[in-house]
Image (tube, coloured by chain):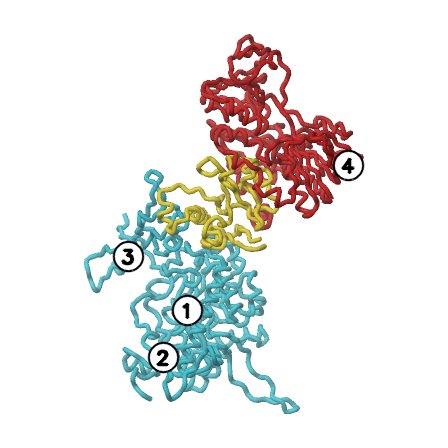
Chain colours: A red, B yellow, C cyan
Amino acid sequence: MRYVIIGNSAAGVAAAEGIRSRDKSGEIVMISEEKFPAYGRPLISYYLLGATDRAHMDYRPSDFYEKNGITLRLGVRAEKIDPVGHTVLLSDGSEIGYDRLLAATGSRSFVPPAEGLSEVKAKFTFMTLADALALEKALSKKKEVLIVGAGLIGLKCMEGILGRVKKVTVIDMADRVLSSILDEKGSQIVQRQLEARGVRFVLSDSVVRFEEGRAKLKSGGEIAFDLLVMAVGVRPNIELVKEAGGKTDRGIVTDEGMRTSLPDVYAAGDCTESSDIASGKRRILALLPNAYRQGYCAGENMAGGDARFGDAMPLNAIGFFGSHILTAGAYEGESFITGEGDTYRRFFVKDGVLKGFILIGAPERAGIYTALVRERRSLSEVDFEMLKTEPRLSAFSAEERKKALAAEV
Amino acid sequence: MKRIYVNEKWCLGCHLCEYECAFAATGLSDMAKALKGKRIAPKIRVEDCGDIHFAVNCRHCKDALCVKSCISGALSKGEDGVVRIDRDKCVGCLTCVLVCPYGAIMPAPDGHAAQKCQLCTDNTCGVPNCVAHCPNNAIVFEER
Amino acid sequence: MDMYIQPEYEVVRREDRCIACRVCERQCANLVHSFDPETGKMQADDSKCVNCHRCVCLCPTHALKIVKSDDTYRQNANWDGQTINEVYKQANAGGVLLSSMGNPKPFPVFWDKMLVNASQVTNPPIDPLREPMETQLYLGKRTVKIERDERGRIKNTLPPQLKLSAPIMFSAMSYGSISYNAHEALARAAEELGIYYNTGEGGLHKDFYKYGKNTIVQVASGRFGVFKDYLETAAAIEIKMGQGAKPGIGGHLPGAKISADVSETRMIPEGVDAISPAPHHDIYSIEDLRQLVYSLKEATEYKKPVIVKIAAVHNVAAIASGIARSGADIIAIDGYRGGTGAAPTRIRDNVGIPVELALAEVDARLREEGIRDEVSIVVGGSVRSSADVVKAIALGADACYIGTAALLALGCHLCRTCHEGKCNWGIATQRPDLVKRLNPDIGYKRLVNLVTAWNHEIQEMMGGMGINSVEALRGNRLMLRGIGLTDTELRILGIKYAGESL
């Protein structure tokens, strides 16, 4: 049995671990366009910040591939899948046959077309370690940086480089920061905290044209910059599967066992769509925990298992300079707000179930809330009043606590 | 594997386990010297709710969501079943805090990483120090 | 305004060791300790301290000790500090003084004035690790008439017996006076040890019927919780005529302690005081006692031995003789040092006699009258160690009841404030948050350990005497010698003075 895994990040590694949980001897080949053994992708901003270093960024111990009998082929790109012949064509011209194939192709930075953008020399994206290393080379205390995009990627990039450059300006079309994961109040808090550290935000505006070190804005103003980081968003890499005839929508479409519509081809990670149990909608949940669990599930099934991953949901743990913002689920239904000052908690309740939450400056034990969302537990079973101010197991019945604390879980 | 289990019925809410946990982490032989004047940051925490008390620490889940969700690979499950954290790898993003259903993993006081119970396999206690010093068998370390 | 009374004990906290973990504060039901957030330090209110040592035992840095106050009134050999304080207390409150546990006054302890013999040269000692050493025994009537059936075979006419693996039983402590968890610990320990515990007069909680084989149920003047199942479940039935700590008076369990569970077990209304009358209102003579003994035997088809328990008082030998003739199978004698959950101080400290003397008198009297085999004798009332047990048996006891020692094993620190109902060790309380401090899983093992240890020691001492069974030690007063005793005391105890030969 030969397993071929395209992609060497969380989903790919998880798949290998999933396979090895059932099949200790089958051949595993992992293919990656990147030149590094798997590293924690979200660590790149922490790397620039100095909170970690290259030696500690490896996602798995150095003997991981050897110990798990994995043939790692770095620096090659999978170009084409032949689902009939069960082969993958690689960028070095070689072909590799598979019995089971996983597409864990991830996503790529999306750079929208803009006038003059191609003329900007010092422009960067911020997704991969290579991106971060390239950006790092350009950093200097004399330089001013413009980051386009005040989302998760843009702001983490900002955190990583703020102390290493002269100035950072972040621009976004939206009228607030982190608009994909925060409400208005939350955005305000975060923006205020970051502005206090010297970050400049230009919101509800966009660049219409780049000119020699200047970005001309829709509002009429302009921003001077030495380095440009494009952090507008990402797009899933679905082409490989799509071109092979596999079903895709915005992402690669799979069942709960991570099977694509192609025989023996599985998909996992940022390139796929999941069914979000909080909102009930199918969407791309490009998040590491999601990628790992999908990958592990795919791996188990590739090795003959019958695993299902049916509880995907948005989960974000982000923070800047020691602050913590944890969010999860969907922001639907009635909401409840507690906290004061820079502590902010908002809960969203619909149909008697916690659908999602935003926690700023109150990360402790947040997983208790997450479990409520994930399990879709009726709030009538818990003391929600207590939970609104503090996540505690005391809010659950003695019986539930017994299951959690007095039994193997 | 042997895990720490909570007998809520017998927990007195004395919070000794928290101090024994903090003491164990210091590696010192005298608790007064180790903890005098210090604010403790134990990895086991007692919840008090009226007459109900119980301690919570890592459950070392068979299918540990924290391990699966860790963005840096700092969390791992050993062959002995113990979920451990490599604090040098951890960047303190707290994704693990966000996914742990028991609220049993927490930010470390230094703010740079998370911390969690490792069943005293990371010190010289031999058996979990909280269990060894629980006056009422409210936490036990056993196979179930 | 009440007269200020200086606290008896002072809490001493070593500041260099206190880490302000507040365990002492959380563990003190008397609210002695508190945390001062302004200074970040712990404080203590000595006036509330009963010296139960809960905080001392749980303090993880051993930063605490409790010392007796060195504050004194002007020295006076007649009016000592405590006596003066008791007057002040009564003048303040106008009430009867209440106390708990046994008589603490400096009366002689006769156990400590008797020494045990050992074999040398002319008769060999026995090593209990190498040779059989029997501590198993039976309690009950031994008087059997030889009767034969029509085919000439001997009929079994042996009255019912209690089989003990060691000459030790847990004495009567009621559910109400002690907690559910304390009862569970006693019951489970008795079961594991192959001995008996005693319900006291508070009935038997429904959860503990399963330990019936190792349970002695009590029928006292209040008749609490007595009904058919209660009697039938038990291994033996004890009629409580008196208690060493408070001979001549009844009991009074305040309504506050009559929780729903206690109420159900005692079969009395919740929250209403449980009064045990001083006398059994149906017993004014040995003949009346005999009626009750036989009523209970009749009710249980003569399958269970009946024990009659009395306090050791002045005419104990004559009373015991009457009891032996009443049909009782076992006489239990409770000395004046026996414990209690609550007794008027003056009664506890001044009424009754030492069990050692009572035992010697009773055993001698029953022998003289030729009725010693009619009954077994069990003694209690401060049996503190295996040595006391050995001496009791040598004086003529069949077995001993231990109460205070058992409670000590469960954590009791003899603070003597059981009557306040705030036992920090979860023993003499019904407050749920305090009761849970006694985990029976731990408690029963400690009881088992204690009795097992004593049993080993009993074997050692018997071996030294060259005696290989408890049965052979019983009433063997030649194994005892007195020290520091008067001729009268020696005569009553029936022993010679140390150094005196046969």
Residue nearest the viewer, comparing A330 with A92: A92
At label 1, which amino acid type do we have? Gln
User: Label for residue A86?
Assistant: 4
At label 4, which amino acid type do we have? His
Per the image, the residue denoted by label 1 is C243
At label 3, which amino acid type do we have? Lys
Per the image, the residue denoted by label 2 is C116
Per the image, the residue denoted by label 3 is C68
Question: Of helix, strand and loop, which one carries label 1?
Answer: loop
Q: Earlier in the sequence, mark 3 or mark 2?
A: 3
Depicted C51 relative to depicted C483: above or below: above
Q: How dense is the environment of label 2, judged by Cα within 10 Å: few (below 14), some, or many (20 and up)?
A: some
Subunit of label 1: C
In the figure, is residue B17 to the left or right of B144? left
Subunit of label 4: A
Identity of the residue furthest to the top in this view: A220
CB within 8 Å, label 4 to label 2 = no
At label 2, which amino acid type do we have? Val
Which residue shows up at 57% across the image and 12% down it? A210
Q: Position of residue C237 (x, y in %)?
A: 52, 71
The picture quadrant where one finds residue C146 is: bottom right
The picture quadrant where one finds residue A347 is: top right
